[in-house]
Amino acid sequence: MSANTSPAILCFSKSGHTRRAADTLAQRTVAEVIPIETDRYKVPLLWILRAIWDVGRSHLPPLTGGNVVTANRPWIVVACPIWADQPASPARSVINALAATATPVGLLTTSGGAGEPLKCVATCETVLGRRLAASLNIQNKIEDAPETDKRLDAFAHAMMTSASQGVA
């Protein structure tokens, strides 16, 4: 889409959980889902070692061009899995780039456990240099539960409200 003024969901997903959550959010908000791409994690099995290394070192992997589309977007959500209590490194690269914008930014994460989101959110806010407009973590085991739909609705509302109030 060229010169789009719709919201954007920048999504990095390895297993598909995050992509499904991003697609569901997009249906509720007419946002455009834009994949976050990097060649660093494409080699089977080796990607896991690289992911652990990158998260541990706070490494920002290079992204395939054109992933951070901010022009005229009322808000942007970064969607990613949580790796070792931190945002997946490609998403961290995007958040780092978004720090230079005034666009409201939200964080949609997926995880295998319950105790991971707080450190991830704190890291994202530090990298972004401001508070997130909204954040939501969906545990993989409840992604299809009715409770998740309600939480996604509340998250979508928070993002739309942040844009209408000019919250960055």
Image (tube, rainbow, N blue to C red):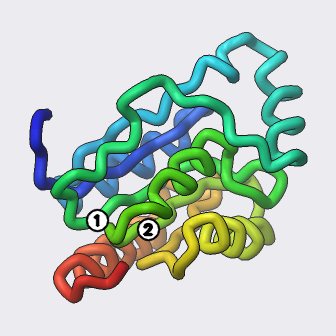
**Residue at left offset 57%, top offset 58%:** 109
**Residue 121 x %, y %:** 65, 71
Q: Position of residue 57 (x, y in %)?
A: 87, 46
Q: Quadrant of residue 110?
A: bottom right
How far is disc 2 from disc 1 in space, using C-alphas? 8 Å
* In this rendering, position of residue 97 left or right of residue 112: left
- State the residue at coordinates (32%, 57%): 25
Q: Amino acid at mark 1?
A: Trp
Q: Is residue 52 above or below residue 158?
A: above
Residue of label 2:
106
The residue carrying mark 1 is: 75
Secondary structure state at the residue bearing disc 2? strand
Residue 82 screen position, x and y as percent: 70, 53
Q: Position of residue 107 (x, y in %)?
A: 50, 64
The residue lying toward the viewer, choosing from 47 and 56, is 56
In-image side of 124 versus 65 (left or right): right
- Looking at the image, residue 99 lies above or below residue 126: above
Secondary structure under badge 1? loop
Image quarter for residue 164?
Answer: bottom left
- Amino acid type at image mark 2: Gly
Q: Confirm whether residue 38 shows in the render.
A: yes
Q: Is residue 19 left or right of residue 25?
A: right
